[in-house]
Each structure stands twice: as C-alpha cells, then as structure tokens.
Amino acid sequence: MKVTTGFFYKTFINDMNTQIEAMYKAQKQLTTGKRVLSPSDDPVAISRIVKYKTELSALDEYSRVIDTAKIYNSSLETAINDLKNMAIKAKQYAVNGSTDTLSATDRLALAQEVDTLIQRSIETINTKVSGRYIFGGYKADTPPVNSTTGLYQSDTNLQYLDISFFLDVAVNLPATEFFTYQVDPTDPYGNIKVFTPYNQTVTTSGTQLHDADPLSALLMPQPSGGAITDPTAGFTTNGGTLTIQLGDNESVSVTISSGASLNDVRDAINSQAGDYVKAWVVNVGTSGSPDYRLVINSVPNGKSDKIRIQVSTTDAANTGLNLLSYNPDSGSSNMSLEGNINGYNYITDPTDPNYYSFNNNYLNENYYLRALYFLKVALENNDQGRIQKAVDYFDKIADKLYKQQSIIGARLNKIESITDYNLEVKTNTNQNLSNDQDADALQVISELNQRMTVLQAMRVTLTDFFRNNLFDFLR
C-alpha cells in the first residue's frame, strides 16, 4: 500500500486532534467534576441520571410539604391541648357549683366564667393557619363554628397532603368529630339546636320531654308477655294502688283503675303524685319495633334514687302494676334505676323529636360545646342536680379529646417517620447519582497525563518526520 506524504500528514493531524479532544474532555471533567458531559458520553447512564434528578427534585418538594403538614398538625395538637385545659377548668367549675355551700349568686358568677370558656373554645376551633381553618373541611373562607348558634357550618371533608411517593397525611380535623354538629340549614329550629333552651326540646311535634332527668330515672322492665307496642292498650288487668314516696316526704297513694293503659297510668301518677315524681311513657325500642315503657323521675331532678314505690294489685306476677314496684331497701324491685335510658334522656336517633333536647345525654357527653352550654345554663338556673351531671359529661369529653389527640399524635409520628425515610432515600439517590455522574478525579488526572505524554510524543515524531526533504532521500 502506497502512503503519500499528504495522507500521512492528514492522518497524523487527525490523531493529534483526537488526543486534543480527549484531553479537552478530561480537562472539562476535571473542572466540572462530572463524568458524563453529554448524552453521547454514556446514553444508559444519562437516562439514570435524569431519573435520579427527578426523584431528588420530588424529595425536595416533599420536604417542603412535610414542613407544612407538620405545622398544621402541630397547630391542631396545640389547639386540642388548649381545649383539654378548658375542659378541666369547666369540670372544676361544675364540681364547685354542685356543692351545697354555694348560693344562687355564686353559681351565677361561675356561669359567667363558663360563658367565657364557651367563647374561648369557639375561637380556638376557628383557628386559621396559613389561610386554612384547621377544624373545618374544604371551605376555606368560612369559620367552622358559628359563634352565635354554635352550629358547625363547614363541610366534613379531610384535607390531605402527599408527603412521600406513596403516602399522604391529613392536615385538618373537622370539629364535628368532638366539638359540635351541623343541622339542615333549612330547619326553622336550627339556630337553637346546639344552644337549646333550658329543659326544652326544639320542636312542636311528638312527645315533649321538657324536663327529662339527665342524671337517672326509674325504668319499668318489659312485661313477661313481650314488649308493649301500643301504650293506649290495656296495661293492668285489675288495677290497684301505687304508694309513692320521695325521700322523707310523705307518701302518696295513686289509684289506678282496672283496664288502664300505660298512658292512663302515667297520667294518674302525674295528677296524683306530681309534686314529687314525673312519669313518662317512652319508646325504648325503635319505630319499626316499638317497646313502650314507663319512666319515673323525681321532682326536682337528681333524686330518683330516693323514690320508693309499693304496689297493691291482683295483677299476675311480672305483669301490669307489679312491674312498677321499686324498693331496693327490702329487695322487692321490678323497676331499675338507670342513668341513660334510650328514648328518654339518651337519644341517638336524629329523627326523634327529642333528639336536640337540652337533657339529651348523648349529645351532651359527645360534643364539647353542648357540655359547656349545659353547665352554663344549669349554673344560671341554680340547678344543682344538672350541675352535678355536667361533671360526668366532662369526663367523657376529656376521653374524646384524648382520642383526637392520639389521632394527631399518630399523624405527627407518621410525618417524623416518613421524614427519616425520605432522608435515607435522598442519601441513597444522591450516591447513585454520584456514581453515574461524577468523575473520578485521580483517574481523570492520570488519563490527562497519559494523553499529554502521547501528544508530546506525536509532536516530536511529526517534527522529526517533516524535517526531512527530497534531497535527504536522494543523497
């Protein structure tokens, strides 16, 4: 093969340029610290580098979101702790207010303190963090609780923030979980369904339990023949006499005629012994499966444990008037003293006309605002029995607050755990990115030195070669 001088020269120059380009690349790697400077350097590695950078960018965003989620949930935790402290204070007022040494004026002063707690608690529930109501739902421009009616006026949706590639966390807590509730906005009685008037219901239909005893009452057992499904049907076959006594008061004899219905027995007790007791006919079952019973409470409330009822009748055992005996001192009792009686002072069905009753234990022990309001009104009315009952409410409210606090605590633990996880993922991703992208400085310097040596040798060779001319070959 014949190699001309021109061909040799071009090839030599190309080789030198290749070395120079390689040196330039090595110098660039050394300067930037990057091994891959363009996709053509390592197509496989460049795809991984893009993936790693995307993941790192997402992790940085998650870090910012985590900080936000932590702020919201820490604010919730602080607010619930404030509510818990206020509940403890309210319980102290209830304990003090239930003592015999306080006057009506003293209790009125305590009522004003409780009213302050009501306003403070609503302000706490309407806390806003970074433009969001943390105890509301999606409605960002509406305070969760109406300070005038006590009604919940937001929605009950939970708001979530993504704190990892696969995990999210809630950043709000609707107040309906423990503080208050919402009603149909078209309800004409809606404005008084949280702050219900003293000893009243808020409807004009159905049986009105205006003065149910929230502490306790006597409950008649179910007859041996099964539930009473019609309170207007005959209850006692032969009739008889009920001798009723409340504490040290004189006993009262109530005459019941033969064939009287449960409603008739109620009316007879209320008309003949109404100064000491109050009788009610209550459905302790459901609308589809009724179970009517007689309930008797003391007048005034709070002393039903002191009621004694002797029965004189020829009705068969476990039927009729015999079901109404109550004398635990002698061991002859068919009626039982109950704290919560379904359909009377513990109503869970919102369609029941007495569901929003002032004395509904279910609402008063499950909703913070109802318990505070109940105590305030009981103090204003010098109602020692109901003030005493409020102590029980706040024990149950405290349990609900602890439950909510544990929910928020679990969220914060999740946030802390995922923060550590994300940090570990970020560390590993950075290492993988470095492995694919970063240059080995020692290796690059070694390669650069080698290429410089080769380039120097090529220059010497080229110089020596072209120093010769035609006459040198003819000589």
Image (tube, helix red, strand yellow):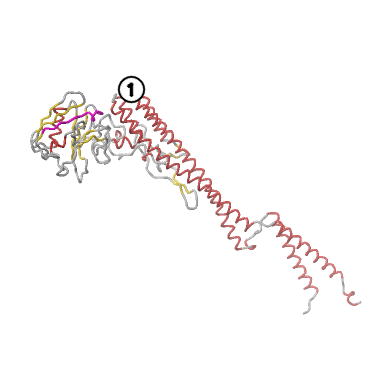
Image: 474 above or below 330: below
The structure residue drawn at horizontal position 86% and vertical position 69%, both measured from the top left corner, is: 467
Q: Residue furthest front?
A: 330
* Stretch of the chain drawn in magenta: 301-312
Q: Work out whether 215 lies above or below 50.
A: above
Image x and y of residue 411, in percent? 45, 44
Q: Is residue 325 magenta?
A: no
View extreme (right): residue: 475
Q: Position of residue 147 (x, y in %)?
A: 37, 32
Quadrant placement of the C terminus: bottom right
Q: Position of residue 29 (x, y in %)?
A: 69, 57
Looking at the picture, how far across and down is residue 435, in whole percent? 63, 57
* Residue found 25% across the figure and 41% down from its top: 351
Q: Which residue is mark 1?
A: 108
> Residue 112 occupies which quadrant of the picture?
top left
Within-10-Å neighbours for mark 1: few <14, some 14–19, many 20+ = some
Q: Amino acid at mark 1?
A: Leu
Residue 419 is left or right of residue 113, and the answer is right
In-image side of 56 versus 378 (left or right): right
